[in-house]
Amino acid sequence: DACIDRINVLLQRDDIPVNPRVDAATLLLAHYQTSGLSDDAERVTAMVAPWIADETLTPTYHALWLLQLAHFRDKQGRDVEAMRHYDEARTIADKTALLLPPLRIFIHLGRSIVALCAGDPETAEAERVQAASYWTFARKLDRALDAAVSAWIAIHRQEYESAVGIVREMVPQMDVYGPVWLRFGARLLHAVCEFEADNDADVAPILARAREIVQGTSLHRHLFGCDALEAWIALRRFGIEQARPLIERSVASRNAHQGAFMVRTHPTLLSEVY
């Protein structure tokens, strides 16, 4: 918290050049959006908007800002805006010959996730393949993320056994190379895959581990995504009456929607529950 507070203070100073300001704001936006703090993320977005027109802003910082902004809009379900920002970041990278692997990879993986949210696994797969072309052996997280996207694509194609095989290999990789919120998300995806393959599968230990990962951290809002998933499983297994308490728990907070973005990639989960 002290670090975040210090960055917020420094961003108010006019004597700091635009490039380090946008760089710091990009990190802040990444933190707020992955923590489910949409209001704070919107504040940062509004603050940065006039800086983008500064002619001294370099293409690298501009493109990386747009990448995080696209991720944020996707988490909000504002997919048209997300795609526009991904396209803008890619245009900057193409025009200025930026070869940053993280930028290229996450543009395509982000577009892949947007396609999944639109129910289009074929476009999602095409974007995943493009992202994979920028892999390096030094970036092992990329392979774990690729596996996660591949598992979601398999879910959309109703290739549930394939999804289970992919996700069981992915989770240990994500535990080694991924940040906390992605380790949490890996468990939600694992539970989805196991349940889709076998409605009687015991996914309670998987979801319990997911809760342990974020409990007591700044990522506790993600627990609403876990609530939504548990409500969906109960609805599928037992029907609306037994699932109702879990559904009500999943929307008990005014910020509940901010934690459900990790399961919106599923083709029907949120629409079935809500």
Image (tube, rainbow, N blue to C red):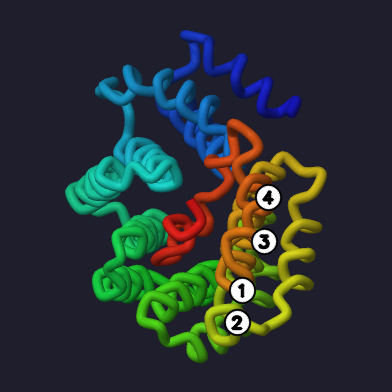
Whether residue 186 is visible to the viewer of this picture, yes or no, is no
The structure residue drawn at horizontal position 79% and vertical position 49%, both measured from the top left corner, is 215
Horizontal side of 150 relative to 213 (left or right) equals left
Q: Which element is circle 1 on? A: helix
Q: Disc 2 vs disc 1: Cβ atoms closer than 8 Å?
A: yes
Q: Where is residue 84 in the image (x, y as percent from the top left)?
A: 23, 44
Amino acid, disc 4: Leu
Q: Could you classify mark 1 by the number of other residues whose Cα lies within 10 Å: few (under 14), some (14-19), or many (20 or more)?
A: few
The structure residue drawn at horizontal position 31% and vertical position 75%, both measured from the top left corner, is 125
Q: Nearer the viewer, mark 2 or mark 1?
A: 1
The structure residue drawn at horizontal position 35% and vertical position 68%, both measured from the top left corner, is 131
Is 147 drawn above or below residue 178 in the view shown? below
Q: Which element is circle 2 on? A: loop
Q: Position of residue 49 (x, y in %)?
A: 34, 22
Q: Earlier in the sequence, mark 2 or mark 4?
A: 2
Q: Could you classify mark 2 by the number of other residues whose Cα lies within 10 Å: few (under 14), some (14-19), or many (20 or more)?
A: some
Q: Which element is circle 4 on? A: helix
Q: Earlier in the sequence, mark 2 or mark 1?
A: 2
Amino acid, disc 2: Asn
Q: Name the residue under label 4.
A: 223
Q: In the rendering, which numbered label is found on residue 199?
A: 2
Amino acid, disc 1: Arg
Q: Nearer the viewer, mark 2 or mark 4?
A: 2
Q: Nearer the viewer, mark 3 or mark 4?
A: 3
Horizontal side of 38 relative to 181 (left or right) equals left
